[in-house]
Amino acid sequence: MLRIGGVDLVILAAYLVAIVSFGLWVGVRQRRRATAEGGYFLAGRTLGWAPVGLALFSTNISTVHLVSLAEQGYVNGLAFGNFEWMAAFTLIALALFFVPFYLQTRVATLPDFLERRYSRPCRDYLAVVSIISAVFIHIGFSLYAGAVVLHALFGINVWVSVVTLTILTGVYTLVGGLMAVVFTESVETVVLLLGAVCITVFAFLKAGGIDGAMELVAAAGEKFPAATMSMLRPRGDPSGIPWYGFLLGYPVIGLWYWCADQTIVQRVLGAKSENDARVGALFAGFIKILPVFLFVLPGLVYLGITKDAPVADTKAVYAHMIQALLPVGVRGVVAAALVAALMSTISGALNSIATLFSYDLYKRFRPEASERRTVLVGRIATLIAVVIAIAWTPFVAQFKTIFDGISALICFIAPPITTVFVWGVFWKPASARGALVTLWSGFVVCGACFVLFYAPPEWAKWLAAVAPGLGGAWVGCLAWYSETVAIPYMLATFILFFVCSVILVVASRLRPDPENAPGRQLVWGNALDAFRRPAWPGLGDYRLLSALLVGVMAVLYVVFR
């Protein structure tokens, strides 16, 4: 077992005390404005572009990223960095095409927007799925990833670290709502970036500088074919995801994650103006360039350093890097960065769960409920969600890698939701009945595909032990699929998006909305209209920033093709 010293533990403890105290201070100051919509859930709609962008990035960059991107760099080189760089394009889509409608309607939640575009049943579906994804993806995977590293570094029992960090984060989240979440996330972003910079710098120093690191990486690539600097991989590459898988599949999951997932987009809904929301989203797009160099590349460099004696348990690569590369004191800073990433994700997810449950579910049955009562119900919902997330944590360990697990789940949640959002803002005939049919049929088809062919084999073995006939059939399906078809999950998500799109178009044609349906006002008559809305002058112009971001990403892909 790896261990780091008392000095580092003191630094980590000091950080925990400081961030919880800061969150509580912000929360107490906010309480005077803590009405349900005005303060607790949407920070009074007072967020500027910088807090919006930093909070978007911080909520996204969880322990999963720090731990699993280093692991993926160690195992597959830069290939999985596409999840970071391609996010820039979906953040541009958020800024240009979705933000205007979200802020124009002043919705508190994205399910609320879906009701205005389609119908109440569509809102109910998205609210439930969003809560489930927040619990099982945003919180569950992050808790497991953080617990693995903290156990490796300090010997802390996995359950002790999971429960303790969840309680500490929940304290200021429950007290201060979104304002406390956003301000602590801004601080946590700085801390986690500082920690990532430390581990990157020391990895290159250990390797003998940039030239030495590149030589070690090249040598490692001869022994481990997947470990290369290339972002775009051919068919049959050991990484398992060719370039066309990312090109076709990522937009489907990216549009759901960055444009239609409440946990992420809630920061945008709290912006004080449309331009603050747009520029904040684009600012996050620029920051998303950094993880490839700060999270993925150090893992690849560390493979070069340890190529003759590679780490056996790759899930603990990040802990090995902290132990082997960093001096005393700096290890504590990086451990604090790890905890910052974990707490920022948990706090963001908890606040979103409170908002979704209160607005989209509770107030449906208690529309007369006071704002104070609504906030209380939201807080109770978050406590229940925490218990469920902790109980789910052990199942995460059954996936091949942490990143494979979270990516696979997202790939089978996203297709129906992405379908109704994209067609909803670009195609007026998309109808309420068509959207509802698409959501539910897509849920069944995508869920069945994941369970039968992409879930960890251990799940089927557990079922076989309880129900031999059903479990045996599941094991047989997994074996047949892996031997005969074996479609990468990123490509499968595009195929499922295509299927959902066909369902939506056919169902909308068969059961159209009236011509004067209110939802038809929330559709771009012409996509170019999105570029004609008022903008800040100079570099603050969202159109200029969007073009600049596209140009930067194009150059990066040429360099690392």
Image (cartoon, rainbow, N blue to C red):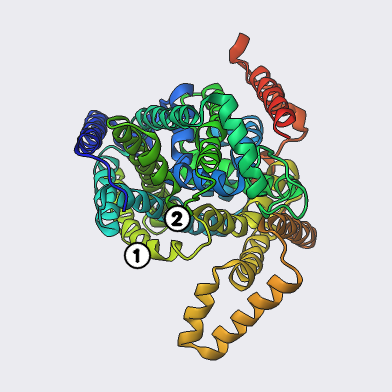
Tell which of 557 and 409 is nearer to you.
557
Visible in this render: residue 288? no
Residue 507 shown left or right of residue 166 in the figure: right
Q: Quadrant of residue 80?
A: top right
Tell me residue 526's x, y (percent): 78, 33
Tell which of 304 and 34 is nearer to you.
304
Visible in this render: residue 139? yes
Tell me residue 470's x, y (percent): 56, 86
Q: Tell which tag, 2 or 1, sits nearer the viewer.
A: 1
Q: Quadrant of residue 199?
A: top left
Graded by Cα atoms within 10 Å as few (under 14), some (14 to 19) or many (20 or more), the crowding at tag 2 reads many
Tell which of 175 and 154 is nearer to you.
154
Question: Callout 1, which amino acid?
Answer: Ala
Q: Going 48% across and 53% down the picture, which residue do you hit?
A: 314
Tell me residue 485's x, y (percent): 75, 69
For numbered disc 2, what is the local secondary structure?
Answer: helix
- Total marks drawn? 2
What residue sits right under mark 2 in the picture?
131
On screen, residue 360 above or below 265: below
Tell which of 192 and 413 is nearer to you.
192
Q: Earlier in the sequence, mark 2 or mark 1?
A: 2
Q: Quadrant of the C terminus?
A: top right
On screen, residue 274 above or below 149: above
Q: CA distance from mark 2 to mark 1?
A: 16 Å
On screen, residue 15 above or below 227: above
Give the label on residue 168, or none.
Answer: none
Q: Going 64% across and 82% down the picture, which residue do you hit?
A: 476
Q: Going 50% across and 44% down the picture, which residue do you hit?
A: 306
What residue sits right under mark 1 in the picture?
391
For numbered disc 1, what is the local secondary structure?
Answer: helix
Question: Callout 2, which amino acid?
Answer: Ile
Q: Going 61% across and 60% down the picture, which residue do you hit?
A: 412
